[in-house]
Image: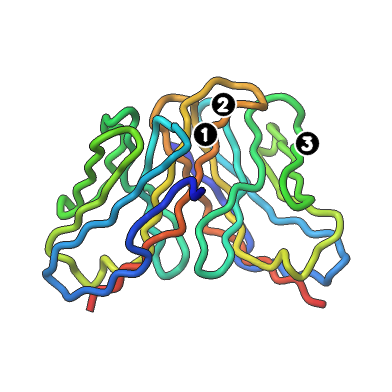
Amino acid sequence: AQSVAQPEDQVNVAEGNPLTVKCTYSVSGNPYLFWYVQYPNRGLQFLLKYITGDNLVKGSYGFEAEFNKSQTSFHLKKPSALVSDSALYFCAVRDSNQAGTALIFGKGTTLSVSS
Amino acid sequence: DTAVSQTPKYLVTQMGNDKSIKCEQNLGHDTMYWYKQDSKKFLKIMFSYNNKELIINETVPNRFSPKSPDKAHLNLHINSLELGDSAVYFCASSQWGGTGPTSRTEAFFGQGTRLTVV
C-alpha cells in the first residue's frame, strides 16, 4: 500500500528566510509525487510534481522540491518565504500510472510565515 | 472558465435526509474522484472513476453512491445523512497519461462542498 508522511504539523519561518516542508513516501512501484497548497476555504492548488527525470523539480510561485529515492523523500523548498505563502501544504503520491489510480495525501503541514 | 466545478458550495441539512453533490470538469480528463476532508483537514479518497467505470471504492458506507453519466460528470448521492458525514467533499479530475515531465497526471480539484448535517 502507498502512504505519505508529513512529520511536521506546522512550520514557522520569517519572511525572507528559506523554508522547507518535509515529506516522505512509501510505494511498492515507481512513485509519482505531488505538492498541493490549500488556502482557507479554498480547494487544492497544484504546485509541482515529480514523475521522472531531474530530481530537482521547479513549480509555481517559486517553489521547488527535491526527489531523493534513497531517502524516499520529496521535500518542498523555497529560497525566500513570503507572508502570502502561509497556507496548508499537502504532499501526495500515486503508486503507478494506471487508469483511475488516486493520489494519496499526507496529513498536511501548516506553513506560517511571519513578517 | 472553471476547470472543475462543484455544486452546491454549501449544504446544510438535517439528519436522515438524502442529498446530492454535482461535479463537472471541462478539462477533457478521463478520470474523476471524490475526496472527503474531515475536520482535521485530512484528505481521504472515496471513489475513483475512469471513463465512467468505477475503479476505486474505498471503505465508504453504502449510503454514499457515486454516479458518472459521462466522462465529464461525477455526482455523489448520500442517503440517510448522519452527523459524522459533516465534512468538505472535493471533486477532482486527472488524465491517465504516460510518463515524462509533460504528462498531466496531477489532479485538478474543485472548490469543495461544505456539508453540515444538523
Q: SS at mark 2?
A: loop
**What is the distance, in whole Å, between disc 3 and disc 1 at their CAs?**
20 Å
Horizontal and vertical percent position of residue B63: 15, 55
Tell me the CA gap for discs 2 and 3: 17 Å
Q: Tell me if A115 is positioned left or right of A94 in this view.
A: right
User: What is the chain letter for disc 3?
Assistant: A
Question: Could you tell me residue A62's position as x and y percent?
Answer: 79, 50
Marks 3 and 1, the one that precedes in the sequence: 1
Depth check: give the residue in front, B94 or B72: B72
Residue B59 vs residue B2, the one in the foreground = B2
Q: Which residue is mark 2?
A: A30
Secondary structure at numbered mark 3: strand
Q: Please identify the quarter of the rendering in which residue B6 is found.
A: bottom left
* Mark 1 lies on residue: A27
For marks 2 and 3 on the same chain, the one whose residue lies earlier in the sequence: 2
The chain to which mark 1 is attached is A
Mark 3 touches mark 1? (CB < 8 Å): no
Residue B47 lies, in percent from the top left, at 31, 43
Q: Amino acid at mark 2?
A: Asn
Tag of residue A48: none
Mark 2 or mark 3, whichever is nearer to me? 3
Crowding at label 1, few (<14), some or many (≥20) Cα neighbours within 10 Å? some
Marks 1,2: beta carbons within 8 A: yes
Left or right? Give the position of A50 relative to A81. left
The amino acid pointed to by label 1 is Val
Could you tell me which residue is drawn at 47 percent across and 37 percent down? Answer: B27
Residue furthest front as drawn: B1
Circle 3 residues within 10 Å: few <14, some 14–19, many ≥20: few
Alpha-carbon span between mark 1 and mark 2: 7 Å
Query: Is residue A22 left or right of A56 when viewed as pictured?
Result: left
**Quadrant in which the C terminus of chain A appears:** bottom right
Q: Name the residue tied to disc 3.
A: A56
